[in-house]
Amino acid sequence: MRIIRFEEKQSQNPVLAAVTEENKVYSLPYSSFLEVIEVAKTKDVRPVDLVNEIITQSVPLTESFDELKLLVPVEAPEVWAAGVTYQKSKEARNYEATNGKLDATTFYDKVYDAERPEIFFKSTKERTIGPSGDLFLRSDSNWQIPEPELGLVLGSEGEILGYTIGNDMSCRDIEGENPLYLPQAKLWARSCSIGPAILLAETVEDPYQFEITCKIYRNEELVVEGSASTNQLKRKFDELASFLRKDNIVFPGTVLLTGTCIVPPNEFTLDDGDQIEIEISNIGKLINPVKSQVAQVAK
Ligand code: DO4
Ligand code: MG
């Protein structure tokens, strides 16, 4: 069972809805994903049971899922991200930090094996965009890529309420130049997208079996394609969430991205007009066009 938000055509108001496995869409009498969680808690039922009860008493929308103008499924007050949680990411970070001339152990090797994971601040509600929104390129970077990641939607205790898709856009040149530049390599306006749906946690049998694919199109031609599975993750999701929670405040609806396992070829950089498609099994496809602010000003 998935939860989405979409913009109602006439009123342009956001509507919360549930999407069944058959792709049928039912609007829900709540204003947000977090309200579903709250009401379920009050009634002492699982969120999926609450949603199923509503669905059995209502009719699906006449519009199909593909016709809806989707919004972020949750207005995450904060987005955090874990890094170097997959072998592939460790290799890519070592490449950019050493210009491909790795000859010693790096701090990326160390963090991959350390007890404490890398967790960094990625985005806020105001900087995060949803399905179909434009992702911006940074104007002072010449080497930018998407990072397709599974996102955990967390409650205030750091508990995993659901799963979504996230794009941790990154500047490999800034990150590789100096690790102290990480916040600038990761965080700028519209450098993070999430969506299109939240898959309720209690409906997922094994979160280490998600298949992730990423496709990048340029002038409608497929220029990058990669796939991976969450079974390649070095850590556990609860472990990542518990480190975020340690001595910290976790605002309900916070999204924790869990690291990238797909890296485009080293010679690739994103360009104005590219389209990024990230798909995760049972969650959906997060599609975003890419815009260079420099190219927009020059036009
Ligand atoms: O240390 C850099 C961040 C790595 C990252 O974002 C990832 O592995 O996904
Ligand atoms: Mg990342």
Image (tube, rainbow, N blue to C red):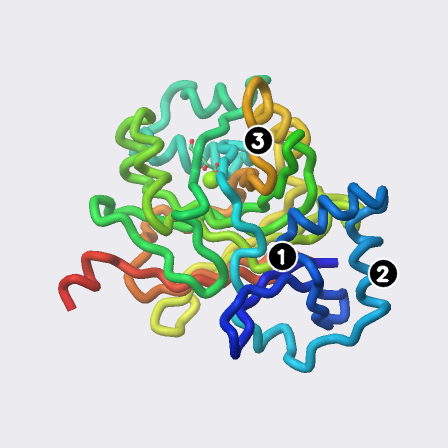
Q: Which residue is mark 2?
A: 53
Which disc number belongs to residue 94? Answer: none
Label 1 or label 3, whichever lies nearer to me, is: 1
| Residue 216 location, quadrant | bottom left
Which residue is nearer to you in this view: 45 or 148?
A: 45
The mark nearer the N terminus, 2 or 1, is: 1
> Which amino acid, mark 1?
Ser
Q: Residue tagged by mark 3?
A: 250
Q: Residue beneath label 1, please?
A: 31
Query: Looking at the image, is 245 positioned above or below residue 135?
Result: above
| Residue plotted at (55% across, 64% down) | 14
**Foreground: 190 or 104?**
190
* Circle 3 residues within 10 Å: few <14, some 14–19, many ≥20: many
Residue found 37% across the figure and 39% down from its top: 186
Q: What amino acid is found at the position of numbered circle 2 in the picture?
A: Glu
**Which mark lies nearer to you, 2 or 1?**
1
- Whichever of callouts 3 and 2 sits on the residue coming sooner in the sequence is 2
State how far apart marks 2 and 1 are (Cα). 17 Å
Residue 9 x, y percent position in the rendering: 53, 77
The residue tagged with tag 2: helix, strand or loop? helix
Where is residue 104, by image quadrant?
top left
- In depth, the one of 91 and 3 nearer the eye is 3
Q: What amino acid does circle 3 point to?
A: Val
- Secondary element under disc 3, as helix, strand or loop, is loop
Foreground residue among 77 and 246: 77
Q: Position of residue 108 (x, y in %)?
A: 44, 25
Task: Determine whether, in the image, residue 159 is placed left or right of residue 216.
Answer: right
